[in-house]
């Protein structure tokens, strides 16, 4: 069985790489999603921008680096700092924060391989076709729903 057996969600929501972080944040909040695929005008998948990537950009660099500050409890009310970091990142291009290492799958990818990839990431999997064109997104819930249905109905 392959990814083709699943009802892959079509890419109803994408961003161009030159979109801004502010645009991505607004879209995520409006559409209640945590990930948005980035695509070229022809539909070729480039990466995913996530709410986690945006949050990481708002946190001080000293807490993001390896062996950096372990917690920020000592800072106190850091709302002004967070707002300042948000303003400083608002006009950045999403492609600068996007995760380009997300491994896309194809319709021919075995379900076991897709399950393995989903278990190793905190993002949905992009499903691509010819020339890397985004066909849709595959979520954990989608795969688990399919597997539960198959286990109940044979």
Image (cartoon, rainbow, N blue to C red):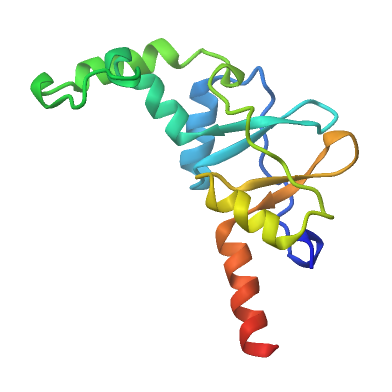
* Front residue of 122 and 22: 122
Q: Quadrant of the C terminus?
A: bottom right
Q: Position of residue 93 (x, y in %)?
A: 58, 15
Q: Position of residue 144 (x, y in %)?
A: 58, 68
Which residue occupies 83% across, 35% down?
Answer: 132
Which residue occupies 50% across, 13% down?
Answer: 91
Q: Position of residue 127 (x, y in %)?
A: 75, 47
User: On screen, 138 above or below 18?
Assistant: below
Which residue occupies 76% across, 59% down?
Answer: 110
Q: Quadrant of residue 13?
A: top right
User: On screen, 71 above or below 81?
Assistant: below
* Front residue of 21 and 152: 152
User: On screen, 64 above or below 109?
Assistant: above
Q: Is residue 87 left or right of residue 154?
A: left
Q: Quadrant of residue 113?
A: bottom right
Q: Quadrant of the N terminus?
A: bottom right
Residue extending furthest toward the bottom? 153
């Amino acid at each position: 069985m392959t990814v083709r057996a699943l009802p892959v969600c079509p890419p109803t929501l994408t961003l161009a790489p030159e979109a801004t972080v502010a645009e991505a944040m607004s879209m995520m909040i409006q559409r209640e999603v945590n990930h948005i695929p980035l695509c070229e005008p022809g539909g070729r998948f480039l990466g995913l921008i996530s709410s986690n990537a945006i949050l990481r950009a708002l946190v001080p660099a000293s807490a993001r680096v390896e062996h950096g500050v372990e917690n920020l409890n000592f800072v106190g009310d850091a709302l002004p700092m967070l707002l300042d970091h948000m303003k400083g990142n608002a006009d950045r291009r999403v492609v600068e924060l996007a995760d380009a290492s997300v491994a896309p799958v194809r319709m021919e990818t075995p379900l076991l391989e897709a399950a393995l990839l989903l278990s190793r990431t905190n993002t949905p999997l992009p499903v691509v076709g010819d020339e890397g064109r985004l066909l849709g997104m595959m979520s954990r819930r989608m795969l688990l729903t399919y597997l539960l249905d198959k286990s109940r109905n044979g």
